Structure formats: structure tokens, C-alpha cells
Amino acid sequence: MNFNDIKSLDEGYVLQTYARNQIAIDHGQGATLFDTEGKKYIDFTSGIGVCSLGYANEAWARAIYDQAMRVGHISNLFYTEPYARLASKLVPAAGMAAAFFGNSGAEANEGIIKVARKYSYEKYGQGRSVIITLKNSFHGRTITTLKATGQDHFHDYFFPFTEGFRYARANDMDSLLAQAGEDVCAVMMELIQGEGGVNPLERDYVQSVARLCRERDWLLLIDEVQTGVGRTGTMFAYQQFDVQPDVVSFAKGIAGGLPFGGFMTNEKCRSVLRSGDHGSTFGGNPMAAAAANVVMEALTPAFLEEVREKGQYLRDRIAALGSPYVSGIRGMGLMLGVGVQGMTHKELKDRLMEKGLLCLTAGADTLRLLPPLVITREELDQGLDIMAEVMSA
Ligand SMILES: *Cc1c(COP(=O)(O)O)cnc(C)c1O
């Protein structure tokens, strides 16, 4: 099918909930994609921070195939090796105590909210269930995670929302303290607000929040759905802030493109959820877990160092463009936000796509770059050449 055929089927039969780019992706290799008309693109999106090992990765595809030929799915009422192996790699790499596996970021965040509320209920009884989240955050699309998201426009239409969320300004301890109270059980935050515009939190602030959480026995819930699993150049972003969460969620990059999400707790919270308290039919599916094991094996210390180096290279080269359209560059590792001025971020994204570079947008005026972690220097340079062509004065 060509693009127009696909588009007309989509418009005929699919709920039109996405502002889709006007191309259909057909296949890819590494960090290079091809559309149905045969046009080539350098990919600075990896889905949305999902395809950490790029496209058509042999080891990844082989692991999925091999697992599919053994057992593609069995319920969580049975043990499976890929699930147990993945937990045994992920948990120590995160400095946590135990993991739960689901399928998506929103589902992972629902889980960490449940941990916080049950921990507090069992220790302090009813009435201590409020979770403070940050303005401009994004935590998912379910009714509860929409309400956890600190952006008013996500709180329209779908009433009644889950109660028990209050919002504080990022990097502002006074704002957080103004939301404190006897009814609070946790603080939940992203360390780099992704959808909100690639805004990294300040290190001092994050450490102060962690300290306050310890003092008040609030759980520190870190949403690493976008920042986790190597994206920022360490296994988890909190490892660069020198804090340790009580509970951390992850999803996007973990299985390199298969649906997978989950969370990990520390020792203190490892027995909060017990048999019957939580579950997921598809969670930790053997094929997805096998794929995630390949991702985890790829993320060696040397690989993570390369992620940091490639991120720095991208930043330096974009800064060196001296583009009148760039107001600033933010982020960590291969999670970068380029502030856009002089045109809208969507216009810039479309112009780059026209010339063969795929990028994302975030917030009101940010071009968001989340290339596959395996992107090569050559692919980075090809993408940067397109940026130079489109963004020079
Ligand atoms: C993408 C994202 C989510 C939601 O993940 P889904 O898999 O789309 O449900 C939650 N939190 C953060 C920080 C995200 O970037």
C-alpha cells in the first residue's frame, strides 16, 4: 500500500486521536527509517524514546522469535525464565529491591500510586493519601494518571477524576511546602519533564525533596518512564542526581519496541503489594521480557558512556550552528530539548522531516530529540547536516 491508501483506511476506520505526521513508516535499520514511498529519514525519535536499539536489531528480533517458538505467552500464575532473569538484572542495576512488570507507562504509574497509598494506609490509616506532583508534568492517560499530570488542560471532560493530587511548582521548595499537610503520602515527579518540554529539575531541589520525603515518611515516587533504562546516559536518571527513590516506574525504552512497563520498590516498600493486590494479564509477557533482556545486556557501562558522549556531541554541534531559531538546549544524555524561536516547534519539525530528519516536539516551543541509543556518529552527522540546512540564518 502507498501512503494515500494507508491514510484513507486510517481516516475511514481509526479514531482520529493523533496529530499524525503525513508519512507512513515502512521499515528501518539502525537509526535510519524509510517511508512507504521509499524516502529515507534519520530518526531522532526512536518512537518516543522506545526503540533504544534502533530498528531491525538482530539480537532483539532473534530473542523475540526464539521466545515465540518456545512459549509466547503464559499467565503470571506460572514462573517464566525471561521474567525472572529480567528482574534479576534490572533490580540491582537500579539499586532497588524488587520489580513488578506491566505493559505501559500509565499502567506503571498507576502501580506506583497504589504502592504509595497502601504503604500509607497500612502504617497511618485512612486520610493520608494525597500525592504531590509537579506543574507541567506528564504521567499518563488513564483517569488517575491524567489527574496526577500537573497540567490543567488534561483535567477536562472526563469527570469525575481520581481525587488526591495536588500540584507544586518545579524547583521551588516553598511551593512544595505550601502543598504539604497531614494528608500527604508521597511526592511523584519526573527528573526531566519530558512531554512538558524537556525540563531537567535542579539537583539541589531533587535532593531537598528526597530529604523532606524521608523526614515526613512520604514516599519518593520517580517517574522514569521516559528518562529510564539508559536514555540519559545512566541506567536511571536519579543516579545522576544522587538520590534513591522509594518506588520508580519505567516503560518506554525497556523492551526496545515491545509494549513493556513496570516499577521497582526499595526494601521498605517491597511487601506493600501482596498476593491479590495487583496484577496484569499481559505484564512481563515472555516475548517482551526476552526483548527487554537484550536491551539490558546492551546497556554496559561503556555503552552508557557512549550515550553521554553522543548526547554531548549533539548538543555541541547544535549550539555550534549558531541558528537564529535556537533559544537554548537542555537535557541529559540522548534526551535533548532544543528551544525554538522565530517559528513554531511544529513548523520546524515539519521542515526537518521534509529534508529527511524525524524529530519530536514537547511543551510549547521545544524540539525534542530522542534518537535510538545505538545511533552512529555517521547518522548523527547526517541528521545534523539536515539541521544545518534547515536552521541556518
Ligand atoms: C510516556 C510517558 C508516560 C505514559 O506512558 P504510556 O506508555 O504512554 O502510558 C508516563 N510518564 C512519562 C514521564 C512519560 O514520558
Image (cartoon, rainbow, N blue to C red):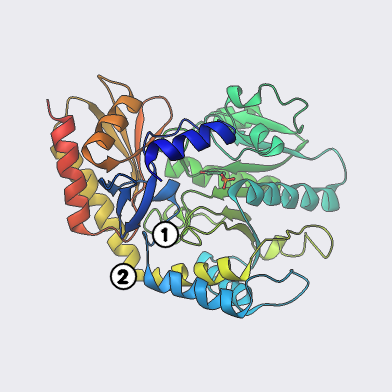
Residue 386: give x, y in percent of width and height. 18, 40
Q: Specify the quadrant of the image occupied by residue 67.
A: bottom right
Secondary structure of the residue carrying numbered label 1: loop
Instruction: Name which residue type carries label 2.
Output: Ala
Is 23 left, or right, of 161 in this rendering?
left
| Residue pointed to by mark 1 | 230
Residue 170: give x, y in percent of width and height. 51, 32
* Farthest-out residue, top: 342
The residue positioned 73% from the left and 52% from the top of the image is: 115
> What's the CA distance linking mark 1 and mark 2?
11 Å
Is 74 left, or right, of 347 in this rendering?
right
Residue 378: give x, y in percent of width and height. 17, 56
Pick the quarter of the image with the C terminus: top left
Image quadrant, ligand 1:
top right
Secondary structure of the residue carrying numbered label 2: helix
* Farthest-out residue, right: 125
Is 232 or 31 nearer to us in this picture? 31
Counting residues from the start of the chain, the first of labels 1 and 2 encountered is 1
| Residue pointed to by mark 2 | 302
